[in-house]
Amino acid sequence: MDESKIGKEDVSIDVDKLAKSLEDVSIDESLIESYFSKAEHFVDLLKLCLEPPKRDGTERPNAYGAVPNASRVVPNVTKLHQTGVKFKSAKPNTNLLDIRFGKGSGTLEIPKLTIGNMTEQLLRNLQIFERLHTDTNYMNDYVVILNRLLNTSKDVELLIHIGVIDNRISDSEGVSTLFQQLSKNARVKNKNFHYLGLVKDLQSYCKSPCHEWKANLMQNYFNTPWAFISVIAASILLILTFIQTVYTVKGS
């Protein structure tokens, strides 16, 4: 079977090509074995495997309360970096949708995503299947949050450098455009937005002047060993000058 239809929307799926695109996402093989007999078709299997694990009640999105336009107030990667947020690629086989922020460490952990020629078709078909055949918004919300985080090519380049994104298409701008296209028809329910807690935690972190001041210091003044040594030397010189001035005043 080379092609399949999902739902009432005319979306053709080249199953062979989509199967090859599995290398673009991190899926635990044990999940594929577990859901294989339950899935009605290939896209259903992917959807089941990518559903995020259940969390306890205190971490449900609606436990944080509503945030007006929650998806629109997500700072992009560059802004987060400027305010001291660190980025880290999640461990292998981590659920693709499981994006987490450690408030204590200030680290945003994102499962690695490979952007290939079939990535857009894969994500788009998962979005459509979810909208037509389920009552969840996981894929929809994942596309939305990535679109906000990857607002510019600079955001993409930073995550490529860190190892969160493996870009196999033309350029960084193409990755940003890909998620802009995918999120055009996305519908966000603020109270049930899957990443609502993440958004609130990031906003809270970015509002702290201390975090931005510390990041500015480290990125602009202590970014190399020589810069650190220069600042220390200048501080010592300033202290010695002050001491000399005090003794000069006392001597006179």
Image (cartoon, rainbow, N blue to C red):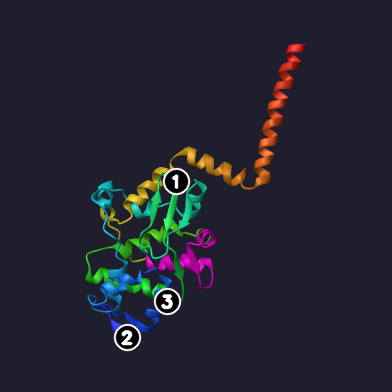
Disc 2: which residue: 3
Verify CB contact (< 8 Å) between mark 2 and mark 1: no
Distance from disc 2 to disc 1, alpha carbons, whole Å, reads 46 Å
- Where is 86 relative to 24, above or below? above
Q: Quadrant of the N terminus?
A: bottom left
Counting labels gives 3
Secondary structure under badge 3?
loop
Asked whether 179 falls inside the magenta stretch, the response is yes
Q: Main secondary structure of the magenta part?
A: helix
- Amino acid at dot 2: Glu
At 40% from the left and 82% from the top, the residue drawn is 17
- Mark nearest the camera among 2 and 1 is 1
- Where is 232 relative to 250, above or below? below
Q: Write down the region rendered in magenta.
A: 156-183
Q: Can residue 179 be seen here?
A: yes
At 35% from the left and 47% from the top, the residue drawn is 200
Q: Earlier in the sequence, mark 1 or mark 3?
A: 1
Q: Earlier in the sequence, mark 3 or mark 2?
A: 2
Q: Position of residue 81 (x, y in %)?
A: 50, 50
At 50% from the left and 58% from the top, the residue drawn is 155
Q: Position of residue 87 (x, y in %)?
A: 48, 54
- Amino acid at dot 1: Ser
Secondary structure under badge 2?
strand
Secondary structure under badge 1?
loop
Disc 1: which residue: 105
Label 1 packing within 10 angstroms: few (<14), some (14-19), many (20+): few
